[in-house]
Image (spheres, helix red, strand yellow):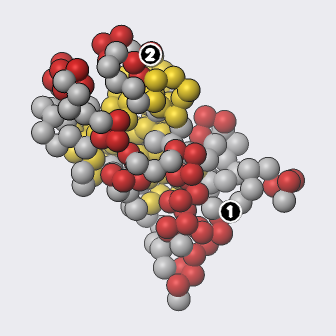
C-alpha cells in the first residue's frame, strides 16, 4: 500500500537526515533538518541544513571575502566555529558523508579556490556552529518522538533546495503519513 511505503524505523547513521517532528518544542530545532556527519558510540554531530542566517559568509568570515553565499546556523553548539559541507570530492582532506556530499577539508586550498572563483555557492554551505549529542542521546530523543530519520539525502536537497521549504519537501518525498505531517501548521491554533 502506497500510504506506508517509507521505512519509518530507520536508525540514525552518518549520511542520514534527522527531521524534527512538527511539535518539537526546542526553538533551536523547530522544523529543522540535520545532516548527521557522524554517529557512533562516542556520540553524534551534524549540521542543520535548512536554517539560513541573514548574513553572507563574506560578512562573517574575513578570509572568505569573495564568497557571497549565505551563512547557515549549523546548530546551537560552538556558534563561533565555522564548518562546511560541499560537493568538492577533490578537496584535500574532505571527509565523505554520503554520495556526493563531503564535510570539511583543507581550508587553505578552499580559500584559494574561492578567490579564483572556482566554487559556486550551489557547491558549498558554510555553517556557524553545529548540532551535537552525547552517547545514546539521539536514541532517547527518538523514543520521545522528537525526530524522524530519513535516508532520502541527496546533494541537490542540501545545496540547491530552498532552505525555508526543505523540511516540508523532504517529508513530502517520504510519502504516506510523512506527507500528511508536512502539512502540519506551525501554529495548530491557526488551523
Q: Name the residue located 53 percent from the left edge and 59 percent from the top edge.
A: 169
Q: Name the residue under label 2.
A: 60
Q: In which quarter of the image is residue 38?
A: top left
Mark 1, Cα crowd under 10 Å, few <14 / some 14-19 / many 20+, is few
Q: Which residue is drawn at 59% across and 40% down?
A: 29
Q: Give x and y (percent) for residue 143.
A: 58, 56
Q: Distance between the residues labelled 1 and 2?
A: 34 Å
Residue 120 located left or right of residue 171: left
> Measuring 41% from the left and 53% from the top, which residue is drawn there?
157
Question: Closer to the camera, 132 or 164?
Answer: 164
168 is higher (above) or lower (below) than 67 = below
Residue at the farthest right position: 189
* Other-residue count near label 2 (Cα within 10 Å), few / some / many at <14 / 14–19 / ≥20: some
Viewer-proximal residue among 124 and 189: 124
Q: Position of residue 173 (x, y in %)?
A: 49, 67
Tell me which label, 1 or 2, sits earlier in the chain. Answer: 2
Residue 183: numbered disc:
1
Foreground pick, 91 / 130: 91
Q: Is mark 1 on a helix, strand or loop?
A: loop
Amino acid at each position: 500500500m502506497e500510504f506506508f511505503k517509507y521505512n519509518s524505523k530507520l536508525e540514525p547513521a552518518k549520511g542520514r537526515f534527522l527531521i524534527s517532528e512538527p511539535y518539537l518544542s526546542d526553538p533551536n530545532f523547530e522544523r529543522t533538518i540535520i545532516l548527521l556527519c557522524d554517529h557512533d558510540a562516542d556520540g553524534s554531530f551534524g549540521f542543520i541544513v535548512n536554517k539560513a542566517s541573514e548574513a553572507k559568509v563574506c560578512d562573517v568570515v574575513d578570509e572568505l571575502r569573495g564568497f557571497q553565499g549565505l551563512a547557515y546556523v549549523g546548530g546551537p553548539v560552538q556558534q563561533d566555529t565555522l564548518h562546511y559541507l560541499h560537493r568538492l570530492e577533490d578537496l584535500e582532506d574532505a571527509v565523505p558523508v554520503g554520495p556526493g556530499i563531503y564535510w570539511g577539508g583543507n581550508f587553505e586550498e578552499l580559500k584559494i579556490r574561492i578567490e579564483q572563483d572556482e566554487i559556486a555557492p550551489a557547491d558549498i554551505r558554510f555553517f556557524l556552529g553545529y548540532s551535537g549529542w552525547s552517547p545514546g542521546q539521539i536514541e532517547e530523543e527518538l523514543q520521545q518522538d522528537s525526530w524522524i530519520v530519513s535516508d532520502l539525502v541527496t546533494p541537490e536537497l542540501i545545496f540547491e533546495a530552498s532552505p525555508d521549504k526543505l523540511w516540508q519537501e523532504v517529508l513530502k518525498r517520504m510519502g504516506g503519513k510523512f506527507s500528511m505531517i508536512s502539512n502540519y501548521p506551525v501554529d495548530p491554533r491557526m488551523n
